Amino acid sequence: MERKELEALGLEKEAIDKVLNLHHSELDPLRDVVKNKDTEIEDLQKASEETKTRISELSKQAQGSDKLKEAFDKFKADAEANENKYKSEIDRRDFEKVLAGEITKRGGKSVIKKLINYDEFKESNDRTADLSKKLDELKESEDTKVLFEPTKLDEQNVGGESIGGEEPKPKTDMPAFF
């Protein structure tokens, strides 16, 4: 959602600011998660490259020595485990990005992310389609469809003024799980 779109609808500046703040309050936590995952992945990638260099050095030294060969084999196994972890983190980050996009596309709240289990989609051949199907099910379910409904704002919160001396409408209470 962009400011231009809201201005085209004729909303006042204050109303636009409040709508955009609500929009960002939903997306910013998802962006932070992805940013943290990116940092973790970069760290793992650096560690993986250092490990590969060390393996190459140890491989040259281990030729002809049983103790060094054992140490090398252990180090190599540890390196493979770290690389698998690195690849898993990349996959999880990509999953988080697809999930965030699919939630946003449906106008859902970021809390929906808590209802989606990564392990359920880990082996999926078409992750986007499977996520889409799962989110559609959640959107139709009586228990979770409220997570896809737009947040209601009272007139005063979006820059409206009371009409004819009427008392401002009370704020709409949000469910406790928000």
Image (cartoon, rainbow, N blue to C red):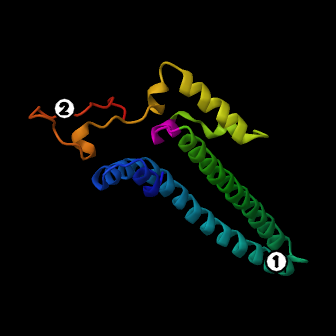
Which residue is denoted by mark 1 in the rendering?
56
Question: SS for tag 1?
Answer: helix
Amino acid on which disc 1 is placed: Ser
Q: What's the residue at 76%, 73% (across, down)?
A: 52
Question: Element under label 2?
Answer: loop
153 with respect to 77 (left or right): left
Counting from the top left corner in percent of width and height, residue 63 is at 89, 77
Residue at 39% of width from left, 52% of height from top? 20
Mark closest to the chain's N terminus, 1 or 2: 1
- View extreme (top): residue: 142
Q: Which part of the image, by quadrant, shows the C terminus?
A: top left
Label 1: few (<14), some (14–19) or many (≥20) C-alpha neighbours in 10 Å: few
Q: Observer-nearest residue: 80 or 164? A: 164
Disc on res. 69: none
Residue 169 tag number: 2
The mark lying in front, picked from 1 and 2, is 2
Q: Position of residue 17 (x, y in %)?
A: 33, 54
